[in-house]
Structures are given as structure tokens and as C-alpha cells.
Image (cartoon, rainbow, N blue to C red):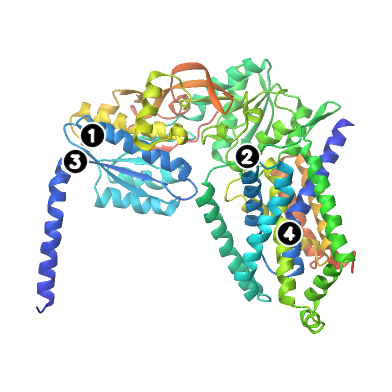
Amino acid sequence: MTLNRRKFLGTTAAMAGTAMLPRAVLAADTIKVGSILDTSGIFDAYGKPMDMALRLAVNEINGAGGVLGRQLEVKAYDTQSDMALYSQYAQQLTRQDKVDVVHGGILSASREAIRQTMRKTNTLYFYNVQYEGGVCDRNIFCNGVTPAQQAEVLVPWAMKEAGGKKVYTLAADYNYGQITARWIQKFVQDAGGEVVETDFFPLDVADFGATIAKIQTAAPDLILAPLVGGAHLSFFRQWAASGMKDKIPLASTTLGVGNEHKVLTPEEGDGIMVAYSYSQDLDTPANNAFKERWSAAYGDPSALHELAVSTYYGVHTWAKGVEMAGSVEHDAVVKALETGIAVDGPAGTYTVDPKTHHSTVDVHLMKFKDQKMDVIETLQQRPPIDTQAVCDLETNPDDNTQYEIQI
Amino acid sequence: MDLSFVILVEMLYAVASLILIGAGLAVVFGMMKVINLAHGEFMMMGGYATITAVGLGVNVFVAMLIIAPLIVGLIGLVVERLVIRHLYGRLVDTMLATWGLSLFFIGLTTMIFGNTTTGISTPIPGFAVGGYQINGYNFFIIVVAVLLLIGILAVLKTTRAGLIARGAMQRADMAATLGYSPDRIYMATFFCGSALSGLAGAVLAPLVGLVPTSGGAYIAKAFITVIAGGPSLVAGLLSSAGVFGVVSQVFTFAISPVIGEVALLIAAVILLRLLPQGITGRFFKGKL
């Protein structure tokens, strides 16, 4: 058989056409959910459980008959912990795959890399991670807790537990730590206390000996430590090693997000106070059922963390919005979500805040105990007050900025 | 009074940890002129070796002082045989090769242990000095650093092996003429250097949260200490670690940890501007 160019092109086109045919039919039936997460590389400890949670939620929805009678289809891209890949895959998701919604992004940098692409192409975007707050954009829904949601409840409670008013802050030296330290200052003052000193640490500082001596000189009643990452974990080790742990109580807004309480020994961790919207150790029927579903799908649930759970909420929140709107059309879904949709799940209720597109969540006050988080108290429905202070999408729907919140 | 004692201990500790971090590199880079960019990863592997051994039920001190150096030394031996020995005398090429090795080790460790933070707790309790609590483990590190320096000095100065090693580093051809195989000597020296790195990583492991990329935190300090120290091994290590440890701690106490780190780097820049050959290029000449 001789093959000339025309014949070749004709055959391949026909072949490609047939190959695409069933997909095209299928595509008309399914709703496409885009996912863009780091499931390999240095952030995979965050990204992998998030990806699993997204698929779990999608499978649950599909198992219950889908959304509007249509099945969901996941289009997932692994960004390999490389910020450059975010913009590339965002283009692919929005322009080539033409997905109906995108869930994903982990670091704030990755969110900002794709947020404008989503907005330009009118693709609804869910960012499901704890972050520094302040994003004001009608096309995005931010599902994670912001510093004020945690600090607002954690600070007064920790001060009460510590029984004193002098607070020493140790924070990571980048935007999250800087912003959180300012919130801590505000809430300490609101509670009638005083921040005696705030020290910032670059992310690679692993030696806290001098700091521990300085803290003892200042003799505070409580230490608040929004420290981030493996190097900073050393502080909690060295603090316990110097025998200070039972003398001055500790509270943190970050310790435990990456399941750090399982790395610290009970002697090092016990008694540290934290506040999160989720912990594996929440003993509620909803959480136990969720962990069972997770185990059935993936086995051991010990890698679960707050970010995975808020991704799970993100998918369900969006699906509920689509059901309510009666279509996947962008503006209709946004309007439906802005009615203040609430979803119940393993961490309690997540409610969409229409003004900011952030979430009102339950916050649990917890203490580390035997490498678990022991829930002391649950505070219902804490609104994202930091973002609410700067962002109002009801009066200003065309806003498209990330505000730096002035305190 | 109590505070000044605490500050003194913290300074000694800072100096000691710089000595530990620098020792392995001082042997590999200072003596053998191999720019080992995987030095941080050798330390990281020492930490992981300790944690794994402790997890298997080995006494923590045995794990830190014997097992970790041995394992990392053996890894160093393999690396030397496979890669480094082809590159002696080619400074830039060793840099590229060891950088590749460092990426390889980070990837390998991630595959084996996962990309999560691990660690063990310090085996020595803290104790009180007046109104202050001090980390008892700091003293252990100081003691290890002192013994290490004495050990290196003793081996290089009093033993035949040390003499041969020093000779081969200076004139490999002469050593060969006298019947010693430079190849063997280089191999043994690289083993010792790697073992020292493993020891440092192991001893520092209980103080930090360990991740496969932990090595990056050590590498800059190690090179600064060794380069500023200059040509002689022990005197150089001691003097530059002394200067940098004291400078960084003074500024950390007086202002903040960030300024402490900045002060260390500025001190290094000024020192190298004034003494381009390192401290022992001008002072303590001819000492070991």
C-alpha cells in the first residue's frame, strides 16, 4: 500500500475523529471538575491528601447520582511543586479542557499565579487552603481559615489558660507570620494583655538557644508561636529539652496543620494549645463516618489534614451551588453560592460568606495530648472577620485585589 | 550573673555546632580540595541513620556516635569510588558532580522516608541555672566538639596514618615514590571526612526537625566556616567557628535572630576582604 500525504492526513483525521467521538458524547453528559495541585515534589505532603479528598468527594457525588443528573469527571494536573507549571496547567484547564470549575492551588503564590487566568476565562475557582486572608474577587471562593478566625479565639483562650497577660510572640519571617503576628498583637490587647516582644525567624533558622534564654529574661506568661516548617519545629524540641515546657505555656496557629503533633513526642508536645477547623481526633459521628469512608477508599487515614478536609468541603459546596442554580453556568452558580450555602461534614458546618466569598467555619480549641489533638471546646460558625474588614463583594462586585489588612 | 552564664553557654554551643558542621568539610575540602556540595546531605543522612537506628531499638548514643558515622562513612566510600576519584584536581567538575549527588540523595531520602518532618527527642534533660533553664544537650554538643578537635589533632599529629595523609595531600607524587598509594589514602581520607559529616548530622539531629532537604540549612555555614578558617585544619576551624559563633550570638541576644544571621554573613565578608587566605593564612601559620 502506498501512502501519500493526502491519504495519510485523511486517514488520521478519520481515526482521530472516531477516537474522539465517544468522548465527545460523554463530555456532553459529564460536568468537568478541574484540579490543580502539587501531588509530587516538596509540597506533596499537602497536595496528595487534598487530591485524594477531591476524588473522594467527586466519587461520593457520582455515587449518589451526580449533579443535575450528570456525572462529574475529574481533570487533574500535577504541578510538581513548581510554580511555573501552575500558569501552564491553568491555561490548559480553562482553554483546552474547558472545565466548569477549578479546585486547587496550595501556596499563596500558586493561587495568585492562576487566579487571573480563571477570572479572565470566566472559570469558577475554589481555593481550599488556610492562608493569610484578604483576597477579594467574585470569581474565587476561599474555603480555608484565615489568621483572624483562629487567632481571635485562640489568643483569649490561651491567655485565660495561661492565667497571665504578658505574651511573647515567635513568628515565621514571611507574609503569613508577619500578618498573623499583627493579629496576635491586636487580640492580646483586646483581651487586656500586652505583647512584651515579637521575634521573627527566617524559615531556615533551626537554632533557638539564644531565643529561649531571651524568653526567660522577658518572663512572659504565654508564648504564641506561628512558626512554619521543619526547621522551626526545632523550637518546640529545644524548648522541651531545656525543661521550659511546663513552666511557660505555648500556643500556635500553625503547629499540627502538617500533622506535626505526630512528630513531636508526648513529652515535647503535650499541652500545646492550637485552634483549627479540623482535627483527625474530632470525635463526632460525622468525622468518624468520614474517616471510615476515607479508609474504605484509601486505607490508613493518618495523612488526613485540614487542607484535605477543606478541599472535600469545597467540592461539596460547589456541587450544592450547581444543584441550586440548576445549571453549571458561571454566573448562576456564583449567585446560588452567594445565598450563603452551608455544607455539613467532618469538621462541622462550612457556610459561604456572601460578602467575601470566604467561609464561616466552626473552630475547635484543642490541646496536644499523646500525639493527638484533644478537643477542649468548639466555637460555632466563626466568620472571616479579617477579610470582611476590607472586602465587600456585594457593594463592589468588580473588585479584584488581594488586600493587605491594616490592623 | 545567671544570664551571663547562660549567654556564655549559648556562645560556646554556637561555636561548637559550627565546628561540628565544618569538620567533615574541612577534611574533604580543606585537605583534599574537593568542593563537596553534598556535605549538607551527608549530614542529613547522618540524622536519618540515627533516627532509623533509634527506631530499631538501638541506644541513642550508640546510634549517634558509632552507627551514623559508620553508615555515612560507607556511603562516602561508595561515592568516592564511583565518582570523586575520577575528579581529583578538577575543582569545578567536583562541584558539579557533588551538586548532582546532593540532588540524588535528597530524592533518595524522600523516596525512602517520605517528605515529612521526623525527629527524635533530646536524650539529656534540661537543668536550672539560677532562674534560668538550660538545654542540657548543649553541653553534650560542646563536649563532642572539643573531643573531636582533640581527636583530629591527635590523629594528624601523632599517628603515622595522619602523617602519611598530610604528606599525600601536599605532594601525592612524593608519597607515591615512597611507596604509599595516594589512591588508597584519598579513599581513606574521604571516608573519614564523610564519617565526620555523618557524626555532625547525627549529633545535631535531636535538636531539629529533619526533612530530606535539611542539608541546605548547613551547607552555607559549613563553607563559610571552612573557607574563613584558611589552610590549617584544626586551628582554622577553631578560630573561624569562634569568631562567627560569638558574633552571631551577640547580635542574636542584643537584637534578633535575623540580625544574628545577617551579622554572621557580614562578618564573613569583612573577614575574607581583610584576610583573603582565611584566618590561618595570616595567623597561626604552620599550625595544624
Give the Cα distance between marks 1 and 2.
42 Å
**Which label sits in the foreground, 4 or 2?**
4
**Please, what is the three-letter code of the amino acid marked with disc 3?**
Thr
Outermost residue, front direction? B57
**Please, what is the three-letter code of the amino acid marked with disc 4?**
Gly
Give the Cα distance between marks 4 and 2.
25 Å
Point out residue A25 in the picture as x, y percentages from the top left corner: 12, 47
Dividing the picture into quadrants, the one containing residue A300 is top left
Q: Is residue A27 left or right of residue B162?
A: left
On whether disc 1 and disc 3 are found on a single subunit, the reply is yes
- State which tag comes first along the sequence, 1 or 3: 3
**Which label sits in the foreground, 4 or 3?**
4
- State which tag comes first along the sequence, 1 or 2: 1
User: Disc 1 on helix, strand or loop?
Assistant: helix
Q: Are marks 4 and 3 in contact (CB under 8 Å)?
A: no
Q: Label 1 belongs to which residue?
A: A62
User: Disc 3 on helix, strand or loop?
Assistant: loop
Q: Which mark is residue A232?
A: 2
Q: Residues within 10 Å of mark 3 (few under 14, many from 20)?
A: some
Give the Cα distance between marks 2 and 3.
45 Å
Decide which of A188, B133 is in the foreground and name it.
B133
Point out residue A20 in the picture as x, y percentages from the top left corner: 15, 55
Q: Label 4 belongs to which residue?
A: B24
**Quadrant location of the N terminus of chain B in the rendered image:** top right
